[in-house]
Image: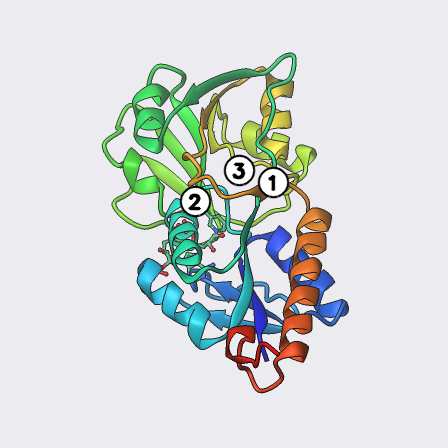
Amino acid sequence: MSALLILGGTAEARELAGVLHSRGVPVVSSLAGRVAAPRLPPGEVRIGGFGGPEGLSRWLAEHDVFAVVDATHPFAARMSASAFEACASAGVPLLRLERPGWRERPGDRWHWVDDVEAAADAVGGLGPRALLALGRQQVAAFAGVDSTWFLIRSVGPPDPPLPPRHELLLDRGPFTVSGELGVLDEHRIDVVITRDSGGDQTVAKLDAARVRGLPVVVVRRPPSPGTTAVTTVAEAAAWASARAEGAAASEESSPDGSRDLDSPSG
Ligand code: NAP
């Protein structure tokens, strides 16, 4: 039977899988396999890369996928580009589910930069003690910064090399404002570094920085490949349900798997 593929690794992807599963839509969720004990979504799960756009395109055909929702993290740019290319070449409908970015509010002192390398260049001028709250794969960009002490917070151990002066804090959201104020105060943090991940799970550090009047270096999201996008799980679920109904109707009209083109035209 054909299925919908969710490219996951986010809370929204898990939620979408749950909604579709409860509606009886056949779903396969795909995870990259970076986290040792990931929170698994309901329904079928596969783990590991596909082997670039060509591998994904083959996988879509082999598993009779009728539609794909790319619900990966806003900074998972390679996976999103690969999905765009593979779905276009396989003729499979694709939707991007991406939470909105964070918005600056009165009292914020944000410094926008284009990438983590620019964040590493900026931090030295903003304060001697930084909270580095990025993905663990991004920390190496700060390895050459010796003017700043870093509190590196990530879900798993960060990939080396690491900056010479640092402490590790392995933790995963959701975080609270009071908890984040405690972290800022305990470690005498004077600048926060983050990516524009959006969502409410990790936004508390920005609220805490505003309360303490601290500057924040915010890394902009990478450019999108141009996939049609929605921002809520409800919108993605409606789109996916409509695709599932279309797929079921076409399976009914050709139960042996043959396409209309092969049917007698009357
Ligand atoms: P990436 O740089 O865009 O992806 C690198 C490669 O990992 C992709 O080309 C693909 O390999 C594989 N991959 C990524 N997501 C996959 C998925 N859902 N299913 C199967 N293969 C996947 O992405 P990343 O930054 O490494 O992130 C990996 C995963 O972690 C994503 O699913 C993302 O949603 C989640 N995540 C990322 C962040 C972040 O900060 N980037 C934060 C939270 C969660 P092939 O080319 O071999 O197919």
Tell me if residue 208 can be seen. yes
Tell me if residue 49 can be seen. no
Kindly tell me whether mark 2's CB lies below 8 Å from ligand 1: yes
Q: Residues within 10 Å of mark 2 (few under 14, many from 20)?
A: some
Q: In this view of the protein, which residue sits in the foreground, 63 or 223?
A: 63
Element at badge 2?
loop
Residue located 70% across and 47% down the image: 235
Residue located 41% across and 35% down the image: 222
Q: In this view of the protein, which residue sits in the foreground, 248 or 171?
A: 248
Element at badge 1?
loop
Is 47 situated above or below 157? below
Q: Farthest residue toward the front? A: 266
Kindly tell me whether mark 3's CB lies below 8 Å from ligand 1: yes
Label 3 sits on what residue type?
Ser
* Horizontal arrangement in the rendering, residue 261 relative to residue 207 (left or right): left
Residue at numbered disc 3: 197
Residue located 66% across and 51% down the image: 236
Q: Position of residue 38 (x, y in %)?
A: 53, 64
Label 1 sits on what residue type?
Arg
* Horizontal arrangement in the rendering, residue 217 relative to residue 21 (left or right): left
How far is disc 3 from disc 2 in space, using C-alphas? 10 Å
Q: Quadrant of residue 62?
A: bottom left
Label 2 sits on what residue type?
Gly
Which mark is first along the chain, 2 or 3?
Answer: 2
Q: Which mark is residue 125?
A: none
Of badges 3 and 2, nearer the viewer stands 3
Which mark is first along the chain, 2 or 1?
Answer: 1
Instruction: Evaluate if marks 3 and 2 touch, with contact meaning CB atoms under 8 Å apart.
Output: no
How far is disc 3 from disc 1 in space, using C-alphas? 8 Å
